[in-house]
Image: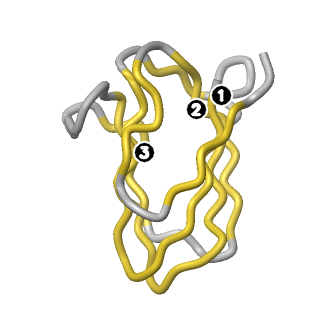
Amino acid sequence: MAAIFKYLETTANVKVGIGKLKGVFVSAGTNPTVAIYDSADTGTGNPIVAQFTPAAPGNYVFTGDEGGVGFSNGLYVVLGGTGPKVTVFYE
């Protein structure tokens, strides 16, 4: 399956259900923060990636099992900082 992408400027639920996180590209932001959770809603109990402050621009690829990191509930991405512009790649 080819990766799907979603561009974000605010916190959002990206996908509900089973999938695979392939990568994150941060194109802009002042001290942007990104945290990614395995959640179908706004839950933060199952972190996939703990909050980090990426370089902008910066590309973060998740190789994991068969080219990605699996999640079972959904993909919830929390953004912080000023003006983050983030693209999430997933299956």
- The disc labelled 3 sits on which kind of residue? Val
Task: Look at mark 2 in the image and give the residue it sits on.
Answer: 21
Query: What residue sits 40% from the left and 47% below the top?
Result: 77
Q: Image quadrant for the C terminus?
A: top right
Helix, strand or loop at label 2? It is strand
Label 3, secondary structure: give it: strand
Residue 10 falls in image quadrant: bottom left
Residue 84, image x, y percentages: 49, 72
Looking at the figure, which quarter contains the N terminus?
A: top right
Few, some or many residues within 10 Å of mark 2 (<14, 14–19, 20+): many
Residue 49, labelled with which disc? 3
Q: State the SS at label 1.
A: loop
Mark positioned earlier in the residue sequence (3 or 2): 2
User: Badge 1 is on which residue?
Assistant: 68
81 to 13, vertically: above or below: below
Residue located 56% across and 68% down the image: 85
Depth check, mark 3 against mark 2: the one in front is 2
Is 45 displayed left or right of 13 in the figure?
left
Q: Are marks 3 and 2 in contact (CB under 8 Å)?
A: yes
Q: Position of residue 62 (x, y in %)?
A: 65, 39
Residue placed farthest to the bottom in the image? 30
As drawn, the residue found furthest toward the right would be: 2
Q: What whole-number distance in Å separates the C-alpha atoms at marks 3 and 1?
A: 13 Å
Mark 1: amino acid: Gly
User: Against 56, is 33 above or below?
Assistant: above
Do callouts 2 and 1 mark residues in contact (Cβ within 8 Å)? yes
Residue 88, percent from left and from top: 59, 46
Local crowd at mark 1 within 10 Å, few (<14), some, or many (≥20)? Answer: some
Disc on the earlier residue, 3 or 1? 3
